[in-house]
Every structure is written in structure tokens, then in C-alpha cells.
Amino acid sequence: MNTKPYQRKVYWNEPTMTWWERAYLFEILRGLGITGGVFLGNMWRWMTGRKGALTTYYPEETRADYAAGNRGKHILTQRPDGTPQCIACNMCATVCPAQVIEIDAAFDPDDPAHPKYPSRFEIDYSRCIFCGLCVEACPEDAIRMVKEVPELPSADREHMWLKMDELLTWNPQSDVAKPYPPKGGA
Ligand code: SF4
Ligand code: SF4
């Protein structure tokens, strides 16, 4: 039988407290005083028509300080002639876990360099989970997510379908490093 006496282990970050803190009640009262002061201060600002706490009253208000890497609204990048950089390969739609990307592919016989293009490209934002996998999967840098969030709130789910026009023309972007032969050139 092990008769070794119990020895409490002393940790490197062992808290050290004064007798005042050990008394517990005084610290509880101090914490309640801090919380109550912030609450009453915010309440007073609110009652006098000013903004109190840092809460953003979405959707009436939106934040202006989204992180640069925030996965917000999708955009489709454009070629120099304004056509979508997308080649309608369906990689993004295939990888999308929520299955919210719908693409109709079309063929342009006058453009031998990139004959396949999307005639319809839509995203259903009512089900998108903003995971960014579509952006990762795209071999053409044709779809990106910018930090601004889409204006989602709506009583109509139809409003939450983003069509190709908006994806292309809202905040248009292109990949300047990518050379494209002009239409008609091989
Ligand atoms: S962000 Fe995710 S859920 Fe939304 S469209 Fe892209 S892959 Fe689908
Ligand atoms: S956005 Fe990219 S991944 Fe999606 S269909 Fe177009 S080229 Fe393919």
C-alpha cells in the first residue's frame, strides 16, 4: 500500500491573492459596480439619443471595419473586354458544400482561345455558408470574395439570388497578371 503523503502541486501560474481578494464578497461587489457603471452609462447615452454600446444594429447599420480577409460578397472577375474570366468549368459548383451555385455553360465559336463561358451564373445567398471553398477551387481566379457583406435581409428569398450581372458589375475586378488573347485570336 502506498503511504506517501499527499502533496499539493504548485503550478507556475499559481494565482496570488491578497486577503481582500480571498474574502470574495468585496471583489464580487467591485465587479458588480464596474458592470453596473458600464450598463448605466450606455443606458444614459441611449436615453439621450446617442449611441451607447458598440453593438451594431444590423441590418439598419453595417460595420465599416470588416477585416481585409473577411469572406463577404462574391464577385466574378472580368477580362479586359468585360467578359467574365469564368470558363464555366463547374469546379466551384461541384465543391460548394451548400450546393448554392448554379451555372449554365455556353459556347462561343468566335472565341477559340476561351470558347466556353457562363451564360448564367447565380448564387443563392439564403443558403451560402461563406466558407470560401468556391474561391479556393477556381482554377481561373474567376470568383473572389471581398470583405463587404451582401445586403441580405429580405422578406423575399428571390432577392437573395445574386445574378451574374451583379456579380460582374458590383465592384468590378480583373486579374491584371493574366494575359488574354483578344477575341478572334487563337
Ligand atoms: S462560399 Fe461556400 S457555400 Fe458559399 S457559394 Fe462558395 S462554396 Fe458555396
Ligand atoms: S468561377 Fe471558376 S471554378 Fe467556377 S465555373 Fe467559373 S472558372 Fe470554374
Image: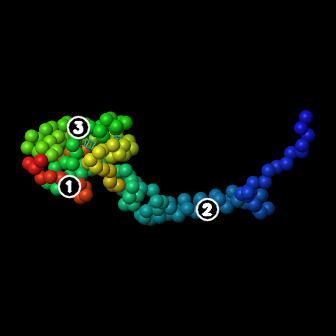
Tell whether 20 sits left or right of 119: right
- Closer to the chain start, of discs 1 and 2, is 2
Residue placed most toward the observer, 148 or 87: 87
Say which of marks 1 and 2 sits in front: 1
Q: Residue furthest front?
A: 186
Between the C-alphas of marks 2 and 3, the distance is 55 Å
Residue 14's x, y, as percent?
A: 74, 56
Mark 3 / mark 1, whichever is N-terminal: 3
Viewer-side residue, 28 vs 90: 90
Q: Earlier in the sequence, mark 2 or mark 3?
A: 2
The residue singled out by tag 3 in the image is 103
x 33%, y 43%: residue: 137
Graded by Cα atoms within 10 Å as few (under 14), some (14 to 19) or many (20 or more), the crowding at tag 1 reads few
Residue positioned 36% across, 43% down in the render: 133
Q: Is mark 3 within 8 Å of ligand 2?
A: yes
Q: CA distance from mark 1 to mark 2?
A: 60 Å
Answer with the quarter of the image where residue 122 lies.
Answer: top left
Asked which secondary structure carries label 1, the reply is loop
Under mark 2, the amino acid is: Ile
